[in-house]
Amino acid sequence: MDAFTSHQASRLTGCTPRQLRYWDQITLVSPSIQRTGGRSGVPRLYSFRDLVALRVVKSLLDGGMSLQRVRRAFEYLRQNADLEGHLSEVKLITDGVSIFKVARRRGEVVDALRQGQMAFFVAIDQIARSVDEEVTAFRRDRDQFIRALRDAVRQVRDEAQA
């Protein structure tokens, strides 16, 4: 397992050393390999997952979320073991007010700030594909109807001329 020092974590995530110390102190993101335990001279050692969590926290804060909201969302996600799986299966989205977790397997969206309340989620690309399929079917049926109508008119004319 790779271990990253505070200095490396700071460089790799864009977080300041002060942020790392504070977030560890308030247990927002603590180094999972080695904490200082209040002892001087003991380095904090972060895992790759810790670096990802640090960068997520930083991006949410940079995006305008308050530290309190980010902390509440992370507490909810930790309690519900949503951060324990493969990292590619976790997707967080924010609208600037709340933080939503998208469950890729089940296709559900939950509000991490409202204790996992289901959120309304519209996948516009799926709706657009569905509408396109409906329009294509409509045009096919319309064209078939117009051909049948023209054939019927032609047949009536032919019978009238005969």
Image: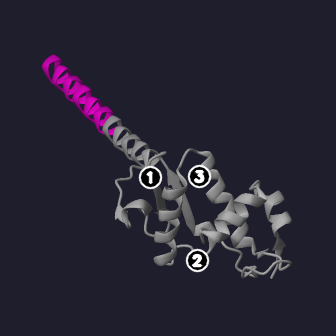
* Left/right of residue 72 with respect to residue 150 in the rendered view: right
Residue drawn at point x = 47 percent, y = 46 percent: 95
In-front residue for pair 29/25:
25
Secondary structure of residue under mark 1 = loop
Residue segment shown in magenta: 140-162
Determine if the magenta segment contains residue 161: yes
Q: Quadrant of residue 83?
A: bottom right
Residue 151: image quadrant is top left
Q: Are marks 3 and 2 in contact (CB under 8 Å)?
A: no
In percent of width and height, residue 111 lies at 41, 60
| Residue 45 seen in the figure | yes
- What is the three-letter code of the residue carrying label 3? Leu
Residue 55: x %, y % from top left: 69, 58
Name the residue nearer the viewer: 91 or 59: 59
Decide if residue 18 is on the left or right side of residue 100.
right
Image quarter where the C terminus lies is top left
Task: Say which of 4 and 93 sits in front.
Answer: 4
- Badge 3 local density, few (<14 within 10 Å), some, or many (20+)? many
Spatial distance from mark 1 to mark 2, Cα to Cα? 22 Å
Vertical order, 149 against 111 (above or below): above
Please name which of the two marks, 1 or 2, marks the residue nearer to the observer. Answer: 1
Q: Residue at x 43, y 44 (%)?
A: 124
- Position of residue 148 in the picture relative to residue 79 (left or right): left
Q: Which mark is residue 85?
A: 2
Q: Is residue 112 above or below residue 27?
A: above
Residue 17 appears at what percent x and percent y?
78, 60
Regarding mark 3 in the picture, which secondary structure is present there? Answer: helix
Q: Which residue is mark 3?
A: 60
Q: Amino acid at mark 2?
A: Gly
